[in-house]
Amino acid sequence: MKSVEYSSLEQAAEIWRASKVAVALTGAGISVASGIPDFRSPKGLWSEFAPMEYATLDAFIQEPNKVWQMFLAVNKLARECQANTAHTSLAELEKADKLKAVITQNIDGLHQLAGSKNVIEMHGCGRILACPECNYTEALPEAGLQIEPVPCPRARTIPGSHRTHRYLKPNVILFGEDLKREVIQDIIHWQNSMDLLIIIGTSADVYPAAALPNAVKALGAKIIEINVEPTRVSRTLSPCFLQGKAEEILPPLQKLVLA
Ligand code: NAD
C-alpha cells in the first residue's frame, strides 16, 4: 500500500481545467452538511437500522411493515434537507461545461435540487414508489411517504399476478437487488469517455461504485478525491487528494477551475 499524498486546491484546479470530460462520483459525505449523516457514522442510519436486517429485498418481502420504518426515517430526513454548497458548486461547474455528469450513490435528490441536470442515480431515488414485481411506478405524494406500506394497485386488480411482492417500495436499490440496466449502461458510457473522475465524500467501498476508480485509472483518466479522511482510493490509486469537507473545498475549487 502506498502512502497518502496530499494535494493543494491549485493542483486540483489545474488538473480539472485541463480535462475535457470530467465526471463526479459522489457518496453520502457530500450530503452530511445538508443534515443527512453518512450511514457509518455513530449517528448514521445503520446505527438504528442494521443493514442486513432492514435494507435487503428479502427483509422487505418477509416483514414489509418493519422495513417501512427505515423508509419512513430516510424519507423524513431527505424531506427536511436542502442542498449545500458542494451540491451547488457541482451544478455551477456543469452549467459552465466543466462537468459532464454526476454519478451518485445517494438517494436524497439533492444534486437535482441544486440544479444538476445530468445525474445518474446509481442506487435509485426515494421520490418514486415502484413495484419490484411488475415495475408499476407512481410519484411519492407531496405530503411524503404514507405511514404504512402501499399495496401495488395491480396486485389488487390482476389476481394472482403478484407472487412475491404485494407492496410498492421507494425506488431505491436494496441489498440483494440489481442495478437498473440503463444505469449500468450510463456508467459504462462515462467510464469509457471520461478523462477525469472527481470522487467526493464516498468511502468507495460499496460495489459497483468501488470498481469505477480502478477502471478509469486503468483507462488513463486522472482522479481527484475530496474526503475528510484518506480512503482506499487515496491509499492505492495516488489521486490528487484534497483532505477536508466537500462543502468547504468545492466552492473555492469551483472558482479556481472557472477563473
Ligand atoms: P459511506 O458512509 O460509506 O462513506 C461516506 C464517506 O464520506 C466517508 O469516506 C467519509 O469520510 C466521507 N465524508 C463524511 N463527511 C464528509 C464531508 N463533509 N465531506 C467530504 N467527505 C465526507 O457512504 P457511501 O460511500 O456513499 O456508501 C454508503 C451507501 O449508503 C451508499 O450506497 C449510499 O447509497 C447510501 N447512503 C446514501 C445517503 C444519502 O442519500 N444522502 C446517505 C447515507 C448513505
Image (cartoon, rainbow, N blue to C red):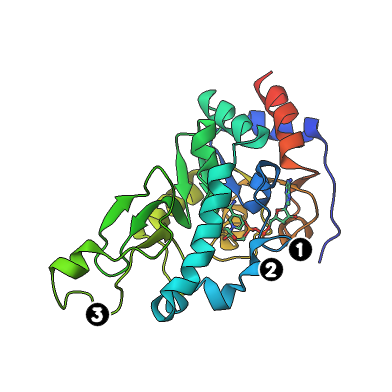
Q: Image quarter for residue 117?
A: top left
Q: Is residue 200 visible to us here? A: no
Q: Is mark 1 within 8 Å of ligand 1?
A: no
As drawn, 20 above or below 110: above
Q: Is residue 161 visible to us here? A: yes
Towards the viewer: 35 or 183: 35
Q: Image quarter for residue 212?
A: bottom right
Specify whether 179 is left or right of 97: left
Sequence-first disc among 3 and 2 = 2
Indicate the secondary structure of the residue bearing disc 2: helix
Towards the viewer: 194 or 206: 206
Marks 2/1: CA–CA distance: 6 Å
As drawn, 165 above or below 191: below
Residue holding disc 3: 163
Amino acid bearing label 2: Ser
Residue at horizontal 37 percent and vertical 49 percent from the top: 140
Q: Image quarter for residue 98?
A: top right
Tag 3 and tag 2, C-beta contact below 8 Å: no
Location of the C terminus by quadrant is: top right
Indicate the secondary structure of the residue bearing disc 3: loop
Q: Is mark 2 within 8 Å of ligand 1?
A: no
Q: Position of residue 22 (x, y in %)?
A: 57, 38
Residue holding disc 1: 42
Marks 1/3: CA–CA distance: 38 Å
Q: Position of residue 70 (x, y in %)?
A: 53, 65
Amino acid bearing label 3: Arg
